[in-house]
Amino acid sequence: MSRILRLGVAVVSCLSLLACAVPHQRDDADATKLAIAEDEVDSVYARYREVYGAAVDIGDPQPLSVVESGSVLDIDTAAFQVDGGGTETVLRAEEVAIPRFGAYPLWFVAVASADGGERRVQVFARASAVDEWTLTESPAIVAQASLPELRVTDDATAVTVSPDDERGMVLSPQAAVDAYVAALASLPEAPAETVAADDPFRQQMVDSYQQSAQLPDVEFSQAWTAEPVQYVLRTADGGALVFATLHRADQFQITPGRTVTYAAGTVQNALAPEGLVGSGVVRFDHQVLLVVPPGSGEVRAIGQFGGVVAVEQG
């Protein structure tokens, strides 16, 4: 595994005023330290593979809480309800970007790959000195997409940027996520000009929306929200690579006497085998990797990971 010398990471610390200090040797020139030593990243992945494999072996997602957090954990926990879980992961870090911090929480980014060609851009975070590293973001790079070149400093550490910093960009990272959510909330209408009309994730959501909206004897609606931006990488051209965590609620009002059912082998079927009657909500979490261009241009997704996290009978 080698460091991406062209890869920089922008860090957001929404809780910086409350965070505890990172233990390090202070001097007047450098009051920060790297989030993790590069030679320790492989051991983080080895531990992740071991624990994930244990969960698969017993067919129970409970061990995942040791190595996953946030929506990654919610998505994988729900997926384990289908036939007792999935298959062991063989992802390994092939490139890493490690930012400097002066306080917890810490995080680093890795481009991870598997033999089958799968490539993910993953964030591991650590809340305090007594906490272990957990996987918090895991979008897969979409077909035909490539990662932009990322900014570095002279010593090859990461470059940081605030989520509300719009200098040199079409939008700040937080504003870009807000615009992206607005484009999804307007489905199936065309997005505003700040979001690419042919965005691959949005097009996937258009198709999903239309399938649900065409169900007979059903009134369908959809709601989208986003978590505050936490992880941002500065691109070499002055733009940004932004990890966005989105929540989607598919809402159904069903004609009396009718039932919405789901195919065997889906998470919806595993969570609601009898289907939905009267009304119900299917909740999804989506992690989307967005490129925010410098100057002017359109926000576009180049990676995504998501799935059903809950089915609620009304």
Image (cartoon, rainbow, N blue to C red):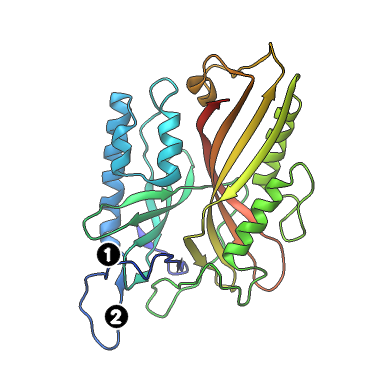
Tell me whether the residue at label 2 lies in contact with that at label 1, contact meaning CB atoms closer than 8 angstroms: no
In the rendered image, the vertical position of residue 8 relative to residue 290, given as above or below: below
* Residue 72 in the image, given as x and y percentages of width and height: 43, 43
Residue pictured at 31% horizontal, 33% vertical = 62
Q: According to the image, label 1 marks what residue?
A: 37
Q: Amino acid at mark 1?
A: Ala
* Residue 279 in the image, given as x and y percentages of width and height: 63, 24
Residue reaching furthest to the bottom: 28
Q: According to the image, label 2 marks what residue?
A: 31
Callout 1 crowding tier (Cα within 10 Å): few <14, some 14–19, many ≥20: few
In the rendered image, the vertical position of residue 278 relative to residue 145, given as above or below: above
Q: Relative to residue 232, is residue 238 drawn left or right? A: right
Residue pictured at 56% horizontal, 73% vertical = 165
Q: Which mark is residue 29?
A: none
Q: Amino acid at mark 2?
A: Ala
Quadrant of the frame with the N terminus? bottom left
Disc 2 on helix, strand or loop? loop
Q: Relative to residue 131, is residue 173 drawn left or right? A: right
* Residue 11 in the image, given as x and y percentages of width and height: 44, 67
Quadrant in which residue 54 is drawn: top left
Sequence-wise, which precedes: disc 2 or disc 1? 2
Please name which of the two marks, 2 or 1, marks the residue nearer to the observer.
2
Residue pictured at 47% horizontal, 60% vertical = 230
Residue 241 visible in the snapshot: yes
Residue pictured at 74% horizontal, 29% vertical = 213
Q: CA distance from mark 2 to mark 1?
A: 17 Å
In the rendered image, the vertical position of residue 218 relative to residue 20, given as above or below: above
Disc 1 on helix, strand or loop? loop
59 or 117, nearer to the observer: 59
* Residue 119 in the image, given as x and y percentages of width and height: 48, 47
